[in-house]
């Protein structure tokens, strides 16, 4: 547990440092990104602007809102079976009324994007199966972002990671990205380690008490 806590804290430090790191060549990290780092890359291409996905359970504030994801076709793609890059546009705050916020239009021409090449959000258990397959209108809503379901929905493969766009003061999207260790943060690993140490100490004390030598009783 202590090793896991140290590993996750190291990942968080690397993630924080990645936002100011030099850009890397996307082609070198696209298919096989390093497991313990988060390359900062720049890509060119165009959005599939009419095929957006809304993650409606991010924990930002009480007003609600959605995290918006868009498929991106890289520049120079010549056939329809090349992988798509899923782009995290950021969080769009709601108004507290439970309704989906109004999505601003995306450019349909080729553009250049810059951000961190990061793993997708963790996948949970979605009751009722694949919700995307049952939706016929875009944008599509989901409570868990499963890249395999999105790839099936689009009919095209995805890159193993997604692009989390850099913060932009001119954008209405909130882009404060971090690794999601909410279910098991480093502090919880240390708490479990403390419990195991406590159990071990208690077991040693009990063992010593049970097996201590007793003075023979006088007849």
Image: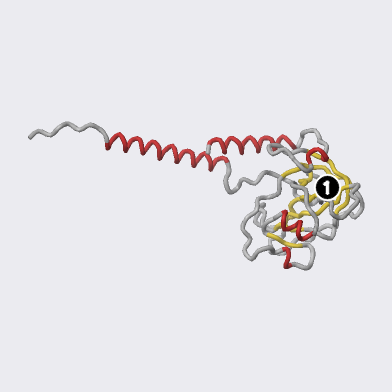
* Label 1, residues with CA under 10 Å away: few <14, some 14-19, many ≥20: few
* Residue 122 image offset from top left, x and y in percent: 65, 50
* Residue 162 image offset from top left, x and y in percent: 76, 47
Give the secondary structure at mark 1.
loop
* Residue 124 image offset from top left, x and y in percent: 62, 55
Q: Nearer the viewer, residue 179 or 39?
A: 39
Q: Is residue 113 above or below residue 141?
A: above
- At x 28% / y 36%, what residue is drawn? 209
In the displayed orientation, state which residue is furthest to the left: 219
Q: Which residue is mark 1?
A: 170
**Viewed as shown, does residue 157 lie left or right of 75?**
left
- At x 81% / y 45%, what residue is drawn? 169
Q: How many marks?
A: 1
Image quadrant containing the C terminus: top left
Say which quarter of the image contains residue 95.
Answer: bottom right
In this picture the colour scheme is: secondary structure
- At x 78% / y 43%, what residue is drawn? 31
Say which quarter of the image contains residue 50.
Answer: bottom right
**Viewed as shown, does residue 193 lie left or right of 202?**
right
Q: Is residue 81 above or below residue 44?
A: below
* Residue 99 image offset from top left, x and y in percent: 72, 64
- At x 79% / y 67%, what residue is drawn? 137
Q: Nearer the viewer, residue 62 or 134?
A: 134
């Amino acid at each position: 547990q202590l090793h896991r806590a140290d590993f996750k804290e190291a990942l968080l430090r690397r993630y924080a440092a990645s936002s100011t790191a030099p850009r890397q060549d996307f082609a070198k990290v696209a298919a096989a990104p390093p497991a313990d780092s988060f390359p900062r890359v720049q890509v060119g291409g165009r959005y599939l602007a009419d095929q957006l996905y809304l993650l409606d359970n991010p924990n930002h504030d009480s007003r609600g809102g959605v995290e918006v994801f868009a498929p991106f076709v890289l520049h120079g793609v010549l056939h329809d079976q090349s992988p798509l890059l899923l782009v995290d546009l950021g969080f769009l705050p709601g108004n507290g009324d439970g309704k989906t916020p109004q999505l601003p239009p995306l450019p349909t021409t080729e553009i250049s994007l810059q951000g961190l090449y990061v793993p997708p959000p963790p996948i949970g258990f979605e009751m009722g199966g694949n919700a995307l397959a049952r939706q016929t209108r875009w944008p599509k809503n989901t409570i868990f972002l499963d890249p395999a379901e999105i790839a099936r929905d689009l009919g095209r493969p995805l890159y193993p990671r997604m692009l989390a766009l850099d913060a932009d003061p001119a954008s209405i999207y909130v882009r404060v990205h971090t690794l999601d260790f909410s279910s098991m943060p480093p502090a919880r690993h240390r708490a479990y380690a403390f419990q195991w140490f406590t159990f071990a100490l208690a077991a040693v004390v009990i063992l010593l008490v049970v097996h201590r030598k007793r003075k023979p009783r006088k007849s």
